[in-house]
Image (spheres, rainbow, N blue to C red):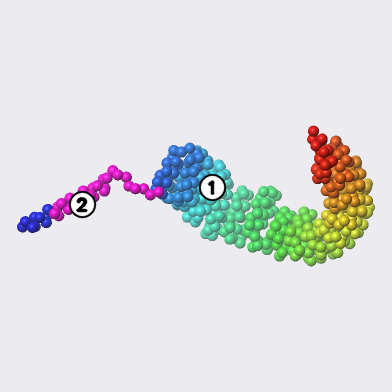
Amino acid sequence: MVRNMYRFWVFLMALTVLILSVNSLVFSDEPKQLTSEQLALRKYIGMLQTGDETERREACYQLGKMKNPEAVDYLLTAIDDTALSVSKSAIIALGEIGDPRAIEPLVQKLSSYDEWIRKAATDALVILGSQAINALLPLLENENPAVRERAVITLGLIGDPKVTEAVRALVDDPDQQVSIAASNALAQLGSSEAVSALMEKLGSLDYFIQTQAKQAILQIGYAAIPEVISGLKSDSVEVRRCSADILGQMKAEEAILPLVSALSDIDEVTRKTAALALGAIGGAAVSEVLTALDSDNNNTVLSAINALGLIGSSSATEKLLPFLSVKTVSLQVAAATALGEIKDPQATDALLLALTSKENQLREAAATALGGIGAVTAVDGLINALSDKFENVRRAVAYALGQLKSPLATTALITALKDKDIIVRQNSAWALGEIKSSEAVRPLSLLLGDKNEGVAKRAYEALEKIGTSEALEILEKYAQ
């Protein structure tokens, strides 16, 4: 009996100790030990609530890096901060955390008057991905075109194919900006309809719309080439021009033959753009462009010559030389220009002969070409041409002699410093600076007082390049 009583009392005492221990744990006033992350969370939430603008912005940044969902409610309040920089930082942080509670508030920010807030909201929603789609779709019917545009841009960037139908409906939106954004979004969603929609926009007379459509097609890249090639035959001259430009930027070798055909387009700008495109494609296009030189259509031949010059392959030299002596002046000038761009020394003699032509434009083009080629054998012929009666020829000759940098031209160029034409004097002064002849120092010093500021400036720069003690002394006195 006594033993049982003893056991009962021991049990009772143990139970009492246990109850007291539990009470001490539950009702203790001593704070629990916080982790470093919890302390940091408290710190940045406090900064977000009471700090100045810089501190609030920093708090958003840090909370975004922490990616702790406990910060979401505080950041959702901060997206309406009176300081736009804080609002933007809070939006970015919510995107980094990726909590779906932020979707609706972020979607509302797509309607913000501030472009950077709209952009930040878009980026955040893209991070949230497909879970944001249901909140975005209703905005495609918003009465504000800016909201529709931003919504469709966001859906395109999210890239979920299930929104293709909804996005496609906006391709025909009455607002051109929305329409372009929808077409671009279709491309991002991998829809084959995107290129067709964008090709139609190339026909717009609005330069901005055209540019947006071109950029979108270029982003699609290789997959767009067949439809863009078809655009070279469009009834719309704008589409043909843009198509040639796009193919050139893509350097699409598949388009060489269609572009060569476009050299015969009735529209001059299309022909020029096709020539530029072939020039961008380069050497692979030479053989096909050369065939266009045999055309009976002078416009086609002219465009082909221009393209060959832009390509710059010496393999075209032999075929171009005969055009320096054809009857059509425009073809002569184009051939001389192309030969100068190709820079093949084999063309030097033929260009020197062209320098004596009765046609002013050809003489000018020949002089420019000889300067580009840079053959020293052209110096004597250019010196003779420096007294040409046509000022444009003299201008080109003076510049070409500067490119050749031959001291043999010094005397003739010094004489040309007195030319009645301002540009001839400028180019002659520049050329003497390139040659760096000490003989030119005194004559150039006289031009420092030329009544034309451009001539005086070129003389000053030439004396600096010559750099002899005499030249520098003259410049020092002039500065005083």
Dot 2 amino acid type = Leu
- Would you say 302 lies left or right of 21 here? right
Q: Nearer the viewer, residue 465 or 459?
A: 465
Question: Circle 1 is placed at which residue position?
Answer: 120
Q: Quadrant of residue 214?
A: bottom right
**Does 27 lie within the magenta span?**
yes
Tell me, yes or no, if residue 315 can be seen here: yes
Tell me where the magenta segment starts and ends, as one range. 10-36
* Mark 2 residue crowding within 10 angstroms, few (<14) / some (14–19) / many (20+): few
Question: Circle 2 is placed at which residue position?
Answer: 18
Quadrant housing the C terminus: top right
Q: Secondary structure at mark 2?
A: helix
Q: Quadrant of residue 46?
A: top left
Extreme-front residue of the structure:
469
Q: Nearer the viewer, residue 19 or 311?
A: 19
- Would you say 432 lies left or right of 18 here? right
Q: Secondary structure at mark 1?
A: helix
